[in-house]
Image: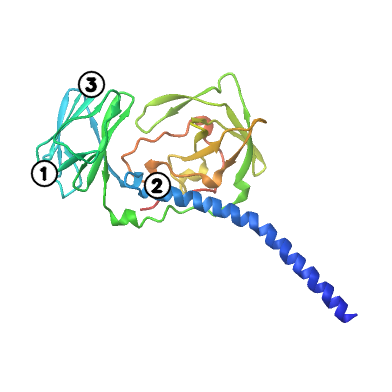
Amino acid sequence: MKVISLFFLLILSSQLFISCSEQTKPVESYENEINQFFEKKTEELKAPRGYLRVNGLFWLEDSKTYTWGSGKSADFIFPDATLPEITGSISRNGNQITLKVTGSIRVFLNDLIFTHGGIYGNDHDLGFVRAGNSEFFVIRRGNLFGIRLFQIKNKEIDAFAGAERFEINPDYKVEARLIQTATSDSIQVLNVLGQVGTYPSPGLLKFSLLGETYQLQPQFDGEQYFLVFGDLSNKKDTYQGGRFLYIDKVDSKGLTTIDFNKAENPPCAYNEFTTCPLPPAQNKLPIRIEAGEKRWKK
């Protein structure tokens, strides 16, 4: 009898082990999904034209010409000792931006040697300008035009391993239902420059989180929804300007999933030279969202 009892005990133990192993597989798979999501984001931030490499932003007034270079006498001082003190000039005439090289250094536009000509026209930039350890192109924000500057080589950026995150918590992955009202087909969003944009919106996403019901309003972003939201953790633990979320579009039943474990810092969390949107009033949650990325500390 003892032998038989021991045999059945071993069978029961093995079944319990298999059952527990099967239960942990979905959890491990989910954690791997979140980790891979942020690993990809980290590589994008470190990329040659990633937001971590942005180290300058210079606004261009109409009908004005500016000098640029590494010297203190330049109108636009580039933090790049490999450049001449005055490397050239940049001019704006309406929606046309031209560049002239006067310093003794090779300058490239889209990898071709460049000395003088347009770098923005017909409402789009004409490519990236490279000189020394710097690369830049023209950005447009409404009727504002600026030069966004990148640093090509930086060992600290190369070693960046990602922002700190909250522990992954499946409770912050919730089902949401799309509801529409008479005014939910668009959303107004303020950015850090004080500009207000109006964007098409699918409606309101209503969901339950930690026993309470909330709603957020996203905007369309290609094949996804894009959401800028704030919460009480912004006061100390997460970026003060809110965080971003990308959400799959709703299915045929009007349902989707909001995963706050994928809440990510906006570009403005990493440098002062980006122009991020801010959470509108209806997207500021009255609770702490202890999921996703924390405030980056350089």
Mark 1 closeness class: few <14, some 14–19, many ≥20 residues within 10 Å: some
Q: Which residue is mark 3?
A: 94
Say few, some or many: other residues with alpha carbon within 10 Å of mark 3 (under 14 / 14 to 19 / 20 or more). few
Kindly indicate whether the residue at mark 1 contacts the one at mark 3 (C-beta within 8 angstroms). Answer: no
Where residue 286 appears, as percent x and y from the top left, is 56, 38
Mark drawn on residue 85: 1
How was this image coloured? rainbow
Q: Nearer the viewer, residue 263 or 22?
A: 22
Separation of disc 3 and disc 1 at Cα?
27 Å
Mark 2–mark 3 distance (CA, rounded to whole Å): 33 Å
Q: If the image is split into quadrants, where does the N terminus sit? A: bottom right
Residues under numbered marks 1 and 2 in contact, where contact means CB atoms less than 8 Å apart: no
Q: Please report the residue visible at 65 percent of the width from the left and 30 percent of the height from the top.
A: 252
Query: Is residue 289 at least partly visible in the picture?
Result: no
Amino acid type, residue under disc 2 in the picture: Glu
Can residue 137 be seen at all in this image of the molecule? yes
Residue at image position (60%, 46%) is 172
Discs 2/3, front: 2
Instruction: Of the two numbered discs 1 and 2 on the same chain, state the one appearing first in sequence.
Output: 2
